[in-house]
Image (cartoon, rainbow, N blue to C red):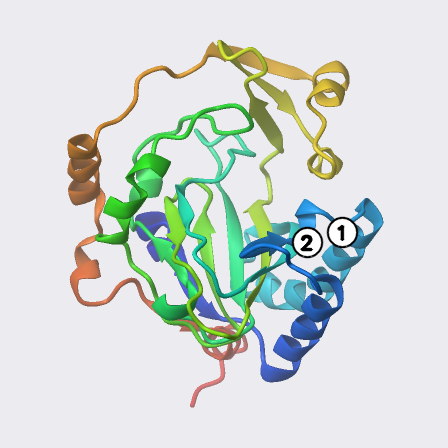
Amino acid sequence: MANDLLKCGFVIVDLLDDTEVQQLTSLTQKYLTQPGQDFISSSHFLSMDDSKQINHELHSIIQPKTDILFPALELLGGTLATKIKGKDILKAHNDWSIVDETIHNSYNLWIPLVNTGKENGTLGLIPGSHLWNNKLRGLGIPGDYESYTHQFLGIGYEPALNAGQAILYNHKLIHYSRPNKTDQPRNTAIIGMKDKEAGLQVSFSADNKTIETYRATEEDFYGFDVKKISSHNQQLPTVPLYTERIGWEEIRTKFNSHLPEEFSNLFCKRESLISKLLHKFKFSY
């Protein structure tokens, strides 16, 4: 599994049982009662206290599983999200860089609470794209890939998942999702992870000329405040804001050169929690 994560940029695992899925579904129904738009995340509008309570609930359910499945990683903050019927497309992008990616990795654990596929907007992935570069990403730093979303729709991998399965994907991996065309909300839990030994950091551009990077704590990501971070946190080297934009032909070249060989027929191996437990305790079928 670790090898697949390095090569593909993601792995798919069996994570939650039916009872745990229902627990998180109830939590979603409690906190996300009036979406108001096609997609909404609890971290976008809830108070810090509510966000911390959700994070506590997520950790209590998920951490015993991830300690077994991903012992080299630690959990970060989590959120609940829902996508209802509509036209919203999550544009192709990679997530903020929150560790020094020249030596460490960070991830999201994306956990659907309903069965997902193309019809309700499962997570679309561009395998191997986490290997394309180590550019800093964050608030005010233009992304390279949003304008090519429709092209990525034609080459991405969109796995059909059962409720309780999960995708652990590298923050550098390009991902997207289609609209939910069904009448059932596509509820998900999402929680961050990182290499245990990695320190947190955050990058942003406040002047449209440079990228500033600072040491960070988990608290800095609640009610994100650029002025507070820049005045209280240790600053790391500043670099010029990226101005060159990648073209589609270059993207296709990178895609073809980094696509894992086994993807033509396997799309990365899946490993269940039960097989991991059996291996850990040396049981066999």
Q: Mark 1 packing: few (<14 Cα in 10 Å), some, or many (20+)?
A: many
Helix, strand or loop at mark 2: helix
Residue 251 horizontal/vertical position (percent): 22, 35
The reply, left or right, for residue 188 in relation to residue 159 is right
In-front residue for pair 156/148: 148
Residue at the spot 49% in from the left edge and 84% down from the top edge: 283
Residue 142 horizontal/vertical position (percent): 43, 25
Residue sticking out furthest to the right: 49
Q: Are marks 1 and 2 in contact (CB under 8 Å)?
A: yes
Residue at the spot 75% in from the left edge and 37% down from the top edge: 219
Q: Amino acid at mark 1?
A: Ser
Where, by quadrant of the figure, is residue 32 drawn? bottom right
The reply, left or right, for residue 51 in relation to residue 171 is right
Helix, strand or loop at mark 1: helix
Where, by quadrant of the figure, is residue 195 drawn? top right
Residue at the spot 23% in from the left edge and 67% down from the top edge: 266
Count of marks, rendered view: 2
The reply, left or right, for residue 199 in relation to residue 95 is right
Instruction: Name the residue that disc number 1 marks.
Output: 51
Residue 263 horizontal/vertical position (percent): 21, 59
**Vertical side of 224 occupied by 284: above or below:** below
**Vertical side of 232 occupied by 116: above or below:** below
**Vertical side of 23 occupied by 206: above or below:** above
* Quarter placement of the C terminus: bottom left
**Vertical side of 24 occupied by 70: above or below:** above
Choose the circle earlier in sequence order: 1 or 2.
2
Rounded to the nearest angstrom, the CA distance separating label 1 from label 2 is 7 Å
Q: Mark 2 packing: few (<14 Cα in 10 Å), some, or many (20+)?
A: many
- Looking at the image, is mark 1 or mark 2 nearer the viewer? 2
Where residue 120 is drawn, which disc sits there? none
Instruction: Name the residue that disc number 2 marks.
Output: 42
Q: Amino acid at mark 2?
A: Ser
